[in-house]
Amino acid sequence: MPEGYCVKCKAKKEIVEAVEEVMKNGRKAIKGRCPTCGVVMFKILGGKAVVPPPAPALTEPVAGLPSPASNPMPLPAPEPGHHPAPEATPNPSNP
Ligand SMILES: [Zn+2]
């Protein structure tokens, strides 16, 4: 019979009516009752992913330090037909 910590008795108790369950994250757990007070006890089995990682994974790139392999910013191509000089010249080839 598995054992668990009863929060009501504040002691380690044997889990009665233990039923093994699989949680949504795939881990197994045992759900049962305290033999003394009857409170529902829940014990998670398998200590693989129980302890969170000590430090978050550095997945984000360091800001302000773009890698040299990154795409250089392309220069904006000049739009044709958008000249600063007015095109309303009556005779441009006038000597
Ligand atoms: Zn208890």
Image (cartoon, rainbow, N blue to C red):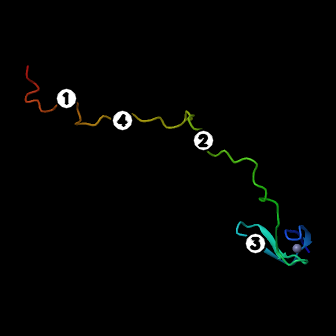
Q: Which residue is mark 2?
A: 61
Percent position of residue 73, x then y: 44, 35
Q: Which residue is mark 1?
A: 85
Residue 63: x %, y % from top left: 57, 38
Q: CA distance from mark 1 to mark 4?
A: 19 Å
Give SS at disc 1. loop
Q: Looking at the picture, does residue 34 appear above or below residue 93?
A: below
Mark positioned earlier in the residue sequence (1 or 2):
2
Tell me what residue is drawn at x 19 percent, y 29 percent.
85
Res 76 label: 4
- Name the residue type under label 4: Pro
- The disc labelled 3 sits on which kind of residue? Val
Between discs 3 and 1, the one toward the N terminus: 3
SS label for mark 4: loop
Q: Nearer the viewer, residue 10 or 42?
A: 10
Q: Is residue 46 above or below residue 70?
A: below
- Mark 3 vs mark 1, CA separation in Å: 75 Å
Q: Residues within 10 Å of mark 4 (few under 14, many from 20)?
A: few
Q: CA distance from mark 3 to mark 2?
A: 36 Å
Q: How many marks?
A: 4
- Give the residue number, with chain letter if any, for mark 3: 22
Residue name at image x 91 percent, y 77 percent: 36
Q: Residue furthest top?
A: 95
Task: Say whether marks 3 and 1 touch (CB < 8 Å).
Answer: no
Q: Looking at the image, is mark 1 or mark 4 nearer the viewer?
A: 1
